[in-house]
Image: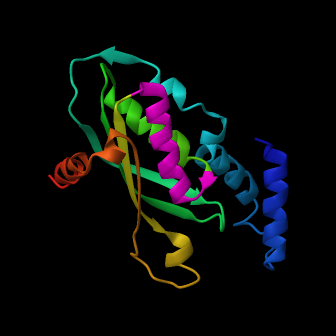
């Protein structure tokens, strides 16, 4: 990340809205925003496949569900946060992954500016590509501050997206099992 560019941009933004970037409360803001960008956009420099690379052999062939994975991301259209929960489920084909690796995969993709629909698909595609399971389902539910605090101003509105791959896209009984397990 180019911290000098980020800090210069923040100074220009502050001036553009009529603020004095040298004012006591704002003097260190460009550096703080630059450090924040390193954290919230850190997924840009990470490869999600590394978290899914270590697998274990398993005779399990039933749906594995990790639910309520909290995530925070930034809308690429307004650069405002969206946040919520993600559920990842897959049907193993002889290999399973450590459960923390699914949460880390969500984190890597969430820490990039993008839209929720793309985020959902990226996670599903990564699990399919790296684990080679029989199928995967990813469901995300999030509140978008671009809808809550600006524009239509509807706080609490939830956007739900889902991606299904492999047998999970073909077999509706797996979807029913997914929803039952998600609601337990």
Image side of residue 140 versus residue 152, left or right: left
Q: Give the main secondary structure of the magenta stretch.
A: helix
Nearest to the observer: residue 5 or residue 22: 5
* Residue 118 covered by magenta stretch: yes
Q: Which residue is drawn at 76% across and 61% down?
A: 27
Q: Residue at x 78, y 78 (%)?
A: 17
Instruction: State the image coordinates of residue 126 (x, y, percent, origin top left).
Output: 50, 35
Against 63, residue 94 (above or below) is above
Q: Residue at x 75, y 57 (%)?
A: 30
Residue 158 is at least partly visible in this image:
yes
Q: Which residue lies furthest to the top in this view?
A: 57
Q: Which residue is drawn at 47% across and 21% down?
A: 53
* Residue 13 covered by magenta stretch: no
Residue 88 is at least partly visible in this image:
no
Nearest to the observer: residue 41 or residue 127: 127
Number of numbered discs on residues: 0
Q: What stretch is highlighted in magenta?
A: 113-132
Against 110, residue 93 (above or below) is above
Instruction: State the image coordinates of residue 58 (x, y, percent, origin top left).
Output: 25, 17
Image side of residue 28 versus residue 177, left or right: right
Image side of residue 26 versus residue 114, left or right: right
Against 146, residue 167 (above or below) is above
């Amino acid at each position: 990340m180019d911290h000098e560019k980020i800090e210069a941009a923040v100074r220009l933004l502050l001036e553009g809205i009529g603020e004095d970037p040298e004012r006591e409360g704002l003097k260190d803001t460009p550096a703080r925003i630059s450090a924040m960008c390193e954290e919230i956009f850190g997924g840009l420099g990470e490869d999600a496949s590394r978290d899914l690379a270590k697998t274990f052999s398993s005779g399990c062939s039933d749906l594995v569900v990790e639910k309520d994975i909290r995530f925070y991301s930034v809308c690429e259209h307004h650069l405002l946060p969206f946040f919520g929960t993600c559920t990842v489920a897959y049907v193993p084909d002889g290999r399973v992954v450590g459960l923390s690796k699914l949460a880390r995969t969500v984190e890597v993709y969430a820490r990039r500016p993008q839209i929720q629909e793309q985020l959902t698909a990226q996670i599903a595609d990564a699990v399919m590509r790296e684990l080679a399971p029989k199928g995967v389902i990813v469901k995300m539910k999030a509140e978008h501050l671009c809808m809550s605090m600006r524009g239509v101003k509807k706080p609490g509105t939830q956007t739900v997206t889902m991606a299904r791959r492999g047998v999970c896209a073909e077999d509706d009984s797996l979807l029913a099992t997914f929803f039952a397990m998600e609601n337990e």
